[in-house]
Amino acid sequence: MNSANARTRRLLGLCLTLATGFSSATVIKDATNFETEARARYGDGSLRLESFDSALPGQYKTGTPSLRLDNLTLYSSRFSVVDETHYLSAGAGHAINAVPGGWGLGDAGWTSEFNSYSSVRFVFDRPIQFFGLDVYDLGTSTGQSLLRASLDGSAAFDLLLQGAPWGSAPCDPAVSGYGCHNNVYLSTSLFAGFFSDKAFRSIELTLIEGESVKPGGFVKDDYVGFDNLRYGYAVPAPATFGLVGLGLLLLVGGVGGPWRSPT
């Protein structure tokens, strides 16, 4: 066996092991940077968009609510599809409105007919590699709102933190009462996105549970809006295809080596 080909095979194997043997997510909080990174990693045609504009407006709150969209399904025990003008004065489409922290649990005002709020889960028809969306109104309730994500049931990681801690200025209940936030209601659009080094099908978005009336607690009654979901499948850019093709060629018999028919 040619020693140069053997070294190339070992190097290629090492690169693939390093690229797939470590599980992590890189969070990006700027939409332009996120989209640029997606195209750089996976090619110009890799970025998909779900605007929710095809969804039927209304409240989804009985039975087992779900919303079927192109290439994915949204699940939550209670959510709404609202007109985009609910968040943007110039809006012309639809968005998702929910309380991923689970507001309403144990509240005497709820009946069995109307479900309490819960986490929001997106399940894709086949594995994706990256995920991002616009986030509205996070941090407009009492205390802090920490939006987290979990992939395929794995340990959750932080996406966005908004709001002022309970008991700190301006969130002093003796002065401001329930005006404890740093994200002006219906006026601020945030972005949260990430790239995973392992493909995944399910992502669950939650707010940290906790009592907002306790010092250091996080809110669980923050209405949050989601719109313009960006995602992409685990398809490498053309340059990566070239690397994989080179590896296969090397494994078959080496570049430039003679081809032998099996006997």
Image: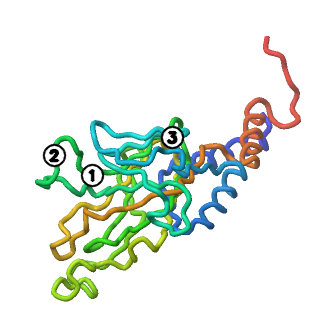
Residue 103 x/y as whole percent: 23, 57
Residue 70 x/y as whole percent: 55, 39
Kindly report the distance in space between the C-alpha atoms of the residues bearing marks 2 and 3: 29 Å
- Circle 3: residue type: Leu
Quick one: label 2 or label 3, which is nearer the N terminus? 3
Front-lying residue, 253 or 218: 218
Residue 113 x/y as whole percent: 20, 41
- Circle 2: residue type: Thr
Residue 17 x/y as whole percent: 57, 46
- Circle 1: residue type: Tyr
Can you say whether 145 is above or below 93 in the image?
A: below
**Number of marks drawn:** 3
Q: Is residue 152 left or right of residue 125?
A: left
Q: Is residue 8 left or right of residue 104?
A: right
> Dot 3 corresponds to which residue?
69
Tag in front: 2 or 1 = 2
Can you say whether 44 is above or below 139 in the image?
A: above
> Dot 1 corresponds to which residue?
117
Asked which secondary structure carries label 1, the reply is loop
Figure quadrant of the C terminus? top right
Front-lying residue, 213 or 127: 213
> Dot 2 corresponds to which residue?
111
Task: Tell me, yes or no, whether the two marked residues, 2 and 1, touch with CB atoms within 8 Å.
Answer: no
The quadrant where residue 100 appears: bottom left
Residue at 62% x, 49% y is 48
Q: Residue furthest top?
A: 263
Dot 2 surroundings within 10 Å: few (below 14), some, or many (20 or more)?
few
